[in-house]
Amino acid sequence: MDINRTHPGCLAHLELHTADEARASTFYSQLLGWRPERIVAESGTYLALDLGGVVGGGIVECATRRPLWLPYVAVDQVEQHTERARQLGATVLLEPREGPAGWRSVVSSPEGGELAFWQPKR
């Protein structure tokens, strides 16, 4: 699934943050048949997952205390949605920033759920 072809308000991407990328990749591949693909970019590597075409996915290896799934929701203005979330009581974990394919930010709701906003480059 092309993360840049989703419509605002729709789930665009599902990303697992874990301390053990290889183990997580093997588990989900064996359990659900999700096919991993290593993507190499200037900023580093990323393990993309084919989740069956409904939504894109990936695995990020990082120093997290507990693995978590981070949903990305497509938006038309990442800065506007990030600020609106802040006004509604969210904590901004990652301010809007530009990447190779678009802009993203991450917020945590007052109840503790984390959500990423995704604005693709057009």
Image (tube, helix red, strand yellow):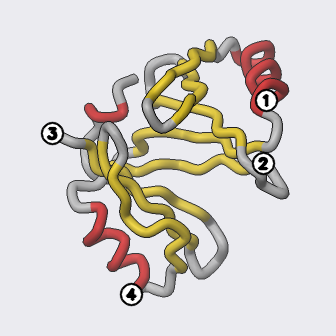
Q: Which amino acid does label 2 sit on?
A: Pro
Q: Distance between the residues labelled 1 and 2?
A: 9 Å
Residue placed most toward the observer, 62 or 119: 62
Q: Do the residues labelled 1 and 3 touch (CB within 8 Å)?
A: no
Instruction: Estimate the x, y position of residue 29 in percent, counting from the top left.
Output: 73, 16
**Badge 2, how many Cα within 10 Å: few under 14, some, many 20+?**
some
Q: Is residue 65 left or right of residue 79?
A: right
Residue placed most toward the observer, 19 or 40: 40
Q: What residue type is labelled 1?
A: Ala
Q: What residue type is labelled 4?
A: Gln
Q: How far apart are marks 1 and 3 (CA)?
A: 32 Å
**Badge 3, how many Cα within 10 Å: few under 14, some, many 20+?**
few
For residue 67, which numbered disc appears in the image? Answer: 2
Q: Name the residue under label 4.
A: 87
Q: What residue type is labelled 3?
A: Arg
Q: Name the residue under label 3.
A: 122
Q: In this view, does 33 lie above or below 92?
A: above
N-term-proximal mark, 1 vs 3: 1
N-term-proximal mark, 2 vs 3: 2
Q: In this view, does 66 lie to the left or right of 7?
A: right
**Quadrant showing the C terminus:** top left
Q: Name the residue under label 1.
A: 24
Instruction: Estimate the x, y position of residue 37 in percent, counting from the top left.
Output: 57, 15
